[in-house]
Image (spheres, helix red, strand yellow):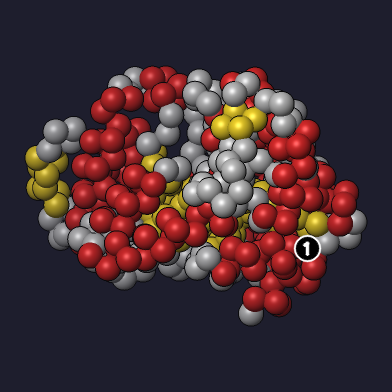
Amino acid sequence: MKFGLAYEMQRPELDDHAVIEETIEQVCLADEMGFDYVWFVEHHFLTTFSMSPCPEVIFGALSRLTKRIRLGFGVVILPYHHPVRVAERVAMVDHLTNGRVDMGTGRSAAYEQTGMGIDPRETREMWEESLKMIPQIWESDYFEWEGKYWNVPPRQVLPKPYQQPHPPIWVAALQPATYELAAERGIGVMALGVSAPSVLEPHISAYRENIKKATPVGQFVNNQWLSSVFGLCGPDNSATRQLCTDSLKTFFGPGRPYVQDQKDVYSRLLDQWGGIPEHLQQNFSRYVDVPAEGAEADGSVDLSGGTALAQKIWEEFDADTLAERGVIVAGDPDSCIKAAKLHEATGVDQLQFLMATETVAHDKVMESIEMFGKHVFPAFR
C-alpha cells in the first residue's frame, strides 16, 4: 500500500504567503521521508477555507525541489477548462517531474461552478466529453474534435506527456454511482468521503470486479483505489488522536464547503464512519431506533430526532472510536500502523492523509510527516 498527502492549502486568511511556504516545506520533507504521492485540490472562491486554485503552478516549484514523490492533480475540475489546456498543462508538469504526475478529475460543487458561469446541470456531460478528449489529445499527431461543448479544428498539441502512453487518470468519488462509472471508464477511484474501511470494503470489491469489463478512456486501465482519511502521527497517542479528530470535525463542521447545503449530511457522515457507537446509542437511547439483535442491518441507526440529533451525536463521536475504526489514522506510530492495516486489508492501493488543516500547526505537521516516514512506513515495506 502506498501513502499520500492531500492539500487544500488551508488558513489563507492568516497569511497567504506563509501557507505557500509551509506547504512547500512540508512536501519537501514528505519526499525525503518516503511518502509516495502528494495531491493538490483545485478550489475557487472559498476564501475562508482554501487557497489552491492552480495546482500546476505550485507543481512547477515542487518539480524542481522534489526527487521521487508523485505529484497528483487532486483534482482538475474539467468543466472549468478547455481540454486542450488541461492536456498541455498536465503534460508540461509531467516533463518537469520526469514522469511523476497523476491526473485526478472531477466536477466541483454548485457554489464554485456558478461562480465560473457554469450550469451545474451540465457538468456531468462536460466532464464526460473532456475525459474522452484528453487522452486522444495526448495520443494524436493532429487532433480534431466536434462535440457538444468543445470544437477543435485539426491542430498539433504539444507537449505530449513524458510518461508513455500517458499519466494515470482518476476521478474524485463520493458515492457508489461514481465508483461504478470509474470502473466502466477504466480509471482510478479517489474515495474522498472519509469513510471507515469496513464501509468501503464492499464497494472496493465491486470496483475490482466491474473494472474487468472496462472500456478505458485512455490507453490503459488504471485499476487503483485511493481512500482519503485524516492522519496525524505524534508521540502522545491520546493528544494526537484528539488533535486529528478536532481537525476532522472542523473540516466537516456546519456551513463548511463539503457539507454546505447538503441534506441529512450528519446522518450520512455517521453511516460513513461505521454507524453510531454503542456507548452513544446508549447515551441517546431515548431518541434513536437501534436495529434488533440479529436483524439484517447495514450498520446505520434511524434517528427519530432528525438532523439536529444527528449533528449532536456526530459532535460527540469520540477520537478513540474514530481511530479504532480507521476513519482517522492517528496517534502514536503503533496506533497509526494498526489503523492503516485496516485499510490495507480491504484492498486499498493508496491511503491519502489530509494532515495540514487550519487547526493543525505547521510544526505538528512536520513532526507527523517525519514520524510516519521513520516509524509507520517500514511496517508496510
User: Where residue 376 sits in the image (x, y, percent)?
Assistant: 73, 70
Q: Quadrant of residue 312?
A: top right
Quarter of the rendering occupied by the C terminus: bottom right
User: Where residue 333 sits in the image (x, y, percent)?
Assistant: 80, 66
The front one of 148 and 269 is 269
Q: Quadrant of residue 202?
A: bottom left
User: Where residue 143 sits in the image (x, y, percent)?
Assistant: 14, 52
Q: How many marks?
A: 1
The front one of 73 and 90 is 73
**Residue at 66 percent of width and 56 percent of height:** 326
Drawn side of residue 95 relative to residue 20, left or right: left
Q: Which residue is mark 1?
A: 335
The front one of 360 and 173 is 173
**Residue at 42 percent of width and 34 percent of height:** 108
Q: Is residue 45 visible?
A: no
Amino acid tagged 1: Ser
Q: Which residue occupies the extreme bottom position in the image? A: 381
Quarter of the rendering occupied by the N terminus: bottom right
Q: Is residue 328 visible?
A: yes
Q: Quadrant of residue 210?
A: bottom left
Drawn side of residue 367 relative to residue 259, left or right: right
**Residue at 77 percent of width and 72 percent of height:** 374
Q: Examine the rendered structure and indicate whether residue 77 appears above or below residue 185.
A: above
Q: What element does badge 1 sit on? A: helix
Label 1: few (<14), some (14–19) or many (≥20) C-alpha neighbours in 10 Å: some
**Residue at 37 percent of width and 51 percent of height:** 179
